[in-house]
Amino acid sequence: MSDIKLFRLTAGKATELQGDASDLEKPLQTLIEANLEALLGIRILATEYSTGKTHAGRIDSLGLDENNCPV
């Protein structure tokens, strides 16, 4: 996640926050998941969802949009 940048907005001015990706990834994921419905209208279904043996992967955040489509 080194390509994601966070900013603090103060009086209309953005200042980049310094941080380490390993320190930011999980807290940022948790914060976004907790606010997905308010921010994007997405209802969270699962976090760290396994895609099973066939694909052997995982989905960080799985939710449903306003049309009940998985996102």
Image (cartoon, rainbow, N blue to C red):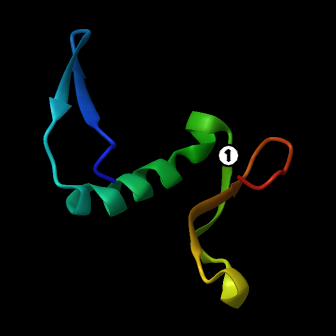
Location of residue 11 in the rendering, given as x and y in whole percent from the top left corner: 21, 10
Judge whether 1 appears above or below 48 on screen: above
Number of other residues with Cα within 10 Å of mark 1, as a class: few under 14, some 14 to 19, many 20 or more: many
**Position of residue 46 measured from the top left corner of the image (x, y, whole percent):** 62, 68
42 on left or right of 12: right
Tell me which corner region of the image, top left, top right, bottom left or bottom right, holds residue 10: top left
Say which residue appears at 67% left-offset and 46% top-offset. Answer: 42
Which one is in front, 24 or 52?
52
**Residue 21 drawn above or below residue 57:** above
Residue, far bottom: 53
36 and 61: which is toward the camera: 61
4 in relation to 52, above or below: above
Residue pointed to by mark 1: 42
Quadrant of the rendered image containing residue 56? bottom right
Q: For the point 82% across and 51% down, which residue is it?
A: 69
- Residue reaching furthest to the top: 12
Image x and y of residue 6, in percent:
28, 37
Write the residue at 34% across / 54% down: 1
Disc 1 marks a residue whose amino acid type is: Ile
Residue shown at the point (26%, 9%) measured from the top left = 12
**For residue 64, above or below residue 7:** below
Q: Secondary structure at mark 1?
A: loop
